[in-house]
Amino acid sequence: MLLSSLGTSIANVGLPTLSQAFTASFQEVQWIVLAYLLATTILVVSVGRLGDLIGRRRLLLAGISLFTVASALCGVAPTLWLLIAARVAQGVGAATMMALTMAFVGGTVPKARTGSAMGLLGTMSAIGTALGPSLGGVLISVLGWRAIFLVKVPLGALALLLARRHLPVDHQGRKTGRTGFDNAGTLLLALTLAAYALAMTAGRGRPDPLNTALLLAAGVGAGLFVLAERKAASPLIRLTMFRDPMLSTSLAMSALVSTVMMTTLVVGPFHLSRALGLDAAPVGLAMSVGPLVAALTGVPAGRIVDRLGTQRMTVLGLAGVAAGCSALAVMSASLGIAGYIAPVVVITSGYALFQAANNTAVMADVPPERRGVVSGMLNLSRNLGLITGASVMGAVFTLASGATDVTTARPETVATATRITFAVAAALIVVALAVAAGGRALTARRSSPEADGLGT
């Protein structure tokens, strides 16, 4: 989990250097990040399902191996486009690691400690995100840009050694003959997700012919995917799964909360630099507070979930995120950096608690044969939320500023845009709270004696 998050964050800091090294535009080197993100988003559900079919341990070992080899290829790539191709392969390995790592929790950790395990995974993800910029900056300055990719080779080898030594062996009696892999559904889902992700990343939230066409293609692809899954003998995603209100609401809440969390990453640098007038170094330190808080609160949040239950902690986590966003929506720039950091600490703490509770609620009772695909769906909802947040919330921020170029907007204009954007973010969390309440009511209704009597 640490390696897959490090794979994204460590590359971001190297984009200016890579632009110079390959004499390429920012739009071109940006594909170094996008290729990895697209590969993980498109394939995370498919590799989860494949792990359910052929064995999670062997597929995870293959994924770690691919990630490690691809990291080496990134480090020795002679051209930009070969580097991007290697990043696609690295993203495929990362998708496997993301989906199957969470799936293993249900089979290796006692149910009473699932929350703690989920909290630990959240901590590792946050550490990878926080460590990437600082580690990448040091490696580039001392050893050059190739080191930011080569450093993951020994780390990947260590992960492979630990996985081989400690993860339980796949059951030899697994019956794969009855259930085949859904090739048509996998292809349709991949094309649909690719179209949506490209629409969000290429359009930056602003409608134009290209991203409008991509969104239409994604809509058509989603419809075709549903039709294919209804007819498939062994579907990639069983549509009946969405009748479970807990799973449906958990996926919806995960997407909404991830959209809001991306707001802090999109808006934060502009607010700190333009509205508060901070230099690059203080901005970097302030931006590292969020991941640091997530790393420190992940494990305690998981233990709280184990002790007090998932439903209450999900709502409490959402309430924390809503409170932090509301504070940023009414804050004054005169409060300075403390007025920004304090609400971000509240947001991030609430997010850590929500993630631990939400993931535990979903994964604790998943049947063994579905753990991989459900874990993949959780990761997919998070990735789609992050992609959507970067585009849509970035567009909200730009529109609220009323400036054609936010980097040159007046400080008071940026401060106003920040407040408006976080007001929208707070509204999204209110929607997530409503979804949580609706899912809870549906679950209670389905488990009531009257519902059982009607069902029989």
Image: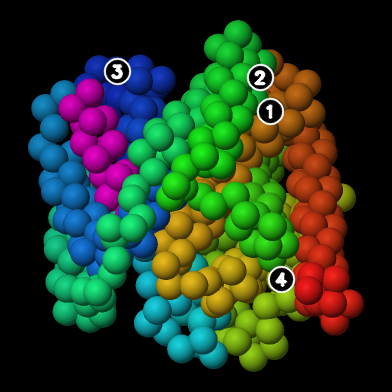
Q: Magenta span covers which residues? A: 80-98
The residue at 40%/79% (across/down) is 107
Amino acid type at mark 2: Arg
Vertical relation: 190 (above or below) 354: above
Q: Would you place residue 303 above or below residue 148 in this image?
A: below
N-terminal of the pair, mark 1 or mark 3, is: 3
Q: Earlier in the sequence, mark 3 or mark 2?
A: 3
Task: Report x, y in % for residue 166.
Answer: 22, 81
Give whichever of discs 2 and 1 has the lower sequence position. 2
Magenta span includes 95:
yes
Q: Quadrant of residue 108?
A: bottom left
Query: Which of the marked residues, 4 or 1, is nearer the chain's N terminus?
Result: 4
Asked if labels 2 and 4 touch by Cβ distance under 8 angstroms, the answer is no
Q: Label 1 near label 2: C-beta < 8 Å?
A: yes
**Which one is in front, 232 or 93?**
232
Is residue 354 shown above or below 187?
below
- Residues under labels 3 and 4: Cα distance? 45 Å
Q: CA distance from mark 1 to mark 3?
A: 26 Å
Of mark 4 and mark 2, the one earlier in the sequence is: 2
Closer to the camera, 16 or 215? 215
Which residue type carries mark 4? Thr
Residue indicated by mark 3 = 24
Residue 229 location in percent, x, y?
52, 41
Q: On residue 395, which mark appears?
A: 1
Task: Give the residue number, with chain letter if any, for mark 4.
Answer: 314
Front one among 268 and 218: 218
Measure how far apart labels 4 and 1 are at the Cα level: 29 Å
Residue at 28% from the left image edge and 36% from the top image edge = 88
